[in-house]
Amino acid sequence: MAPLARGYGALTPPSPRGVRAAVGRVLHAGVLVSAAILLTGYLVGLVGDPAAFGSHAVEQAHLRASASFPHSFVAVWDGIGRGSGEAIIVAGVLVLILTPVAGLVTSAVAFARRRDWLFTAISASVLSVILGSFLIGWLSA
Amino acid sequence: MTIVELSLVLFGVSILAGVLGSLLGLGGGFVVVPVLTLVFHLDIRLAIGTSIVAVAATSSAGAARNVTESITNLRVATFLALATTLGAVTGALLAGVFDARFLFALFGVVLAVSGVQMVRKRRIPVAKDPIPAMATIGVAAAFTEGVDRGGRLADRLALHSAYFDEAEGLEVPYVVVNTGLGLGLMYLAGTLSGLLGIGSGVLKVPAMDLAMHIPMKVSTATSNLLIGLTAAASAVVYFARGDIDPLIAGPVAIGVLLGATQGSKWLAGMRSDRLRVLFVSVLGVVAVQMIWKGIG
């Protein structure tokens, strides 16, 4: 019966409901916030810059150089200040990209609160790998 | 065609990508990239940048519901994310070392073999009341005892769990095995995705289903959470390089968010055998896409 006992004992501590609910809430919030920002950016763009958002032919979009839309945090920030629809959309995309990372931070904190040090350490390690790759990408881009 | 019309088409395609992606644990790139490159002749760099945004959208919108409902195994996802994120970094560093065409062909063949294995795998009968369910765990544990050291690693990490299957109307407990092998496969999957700029949910789901014996539904939901973490690691690079065009990525993000939110609602009630058939069908399509790239 040892194997059965082993299977049972191991079954009792799955991720506690509190941890899962907290991660779920953060992911849900990230989705709602980014969707709101994306829609706002689209509306602002349609009203403020109808040429770029509406009447342009698709062929012209293919010829767009990367430099013509914001692709640094500074450019996005400046663009939002100027009321640029494109910059607001990029901000929404960035919130979306960072949402799973926010979920990971939440689970690390929740595991730590429950004194599950093994999973706190694993979550923190994953986080450091992601932050390290941000840095590598930043320096090489 | 104007930008508004393009946006509407992308929005519609992305809803489909979001539904399929959230059900199957994939990023949706397999729908979005061919449409952007083959139909709209968009530059491949912008297409891949857009596809990364689709991955982030599918992952967050899909996992938001399924983590709370415990279909997603958060501990398995966190542990395996160690390997997938390290793999993604390795892949990014190794970019250019290998012949991309060879890698695409290899990837396609691996997918085809995984697909065949997944078809062969018989559906494990789900017990209709708790006592046989307990016996199933006992048998599974006995089967892995002494044979599989990864099972003990899964014990230590407390990866075993249970989820409530709405389609079957009962709690399904499961024992995770071959944890070390799974970790290794995840590292390879992450490396390949980093090298080729593609999501690797198509490799992550078979690794969990075939190697680690995680139920199909849990595998796709857990893959869903994993791909978002792997994508975040590379997405910032694509953003800084100027590969994320707001006029294209914007409508895709909104469409995928809507589709994935809906898909994650359907996942709980979907029968696992149907989910498997759908997954293997998509796997076949992606395998053909990859082999085509390899020989084309």
Image: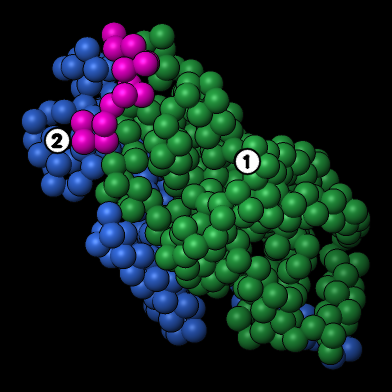
Give residue A113's quadrant in the image.
bottom left
Q: Image check: B253 left or right of B198?
A: left
Using the image, tell me which numbered label, if any, was put on residue B106.
Answer: none
Residue at the image point whose x is 91% and y is 67% from the top: B132
Mark pair 1, 2: CA separation: 40 Å
Q: Is residue B151 above or below residue B59?
A: below
Nearest the eye: B266 or B116 = B116
Residue at the image point whose x is 56% and y is 55% from the top: B99
Q: Is residue B149 above or below residue A45?
A: below
Residue at the image point whose x is 37% and y is 16% from the top: A58
Using the image, tell me which numbered label, if any, was put on residue B293.
Answer: 1
Q: Image check: B17 left or right of B252?
A: right
x and y percent of residue B151 in the render? 74, 81
x and y percent of residue B28 in the render? 56, 39
Say which amino acid is labelled 1: Lys
Nearest the eye: A37 or B191 = B191
Q: Which residue is mark 2?
A: A80
The tint of chain A in the picture is blue
Is residue B58 visible in this depiction of the protein? yes
Main SS category, magenta section: helix
Q: Is residue B154 above or below residue A55?
A: below
Callout 2 secondary element: helix
Q: Image check: B294 left or right of A53?
A: right
Q: Image check: A134 left or right of B85?
A: left
Quick check: do tags 1 and 2 share a chain? no
Instruction: Specify the quadrant that holds the N terminus of chain B.
Output: top left
A111 part of magenta stretch: no
Say which amino acid is labelled 2: Ile
Magenta-tinted stretch: A55-68
The tint of chain B in the picture is green
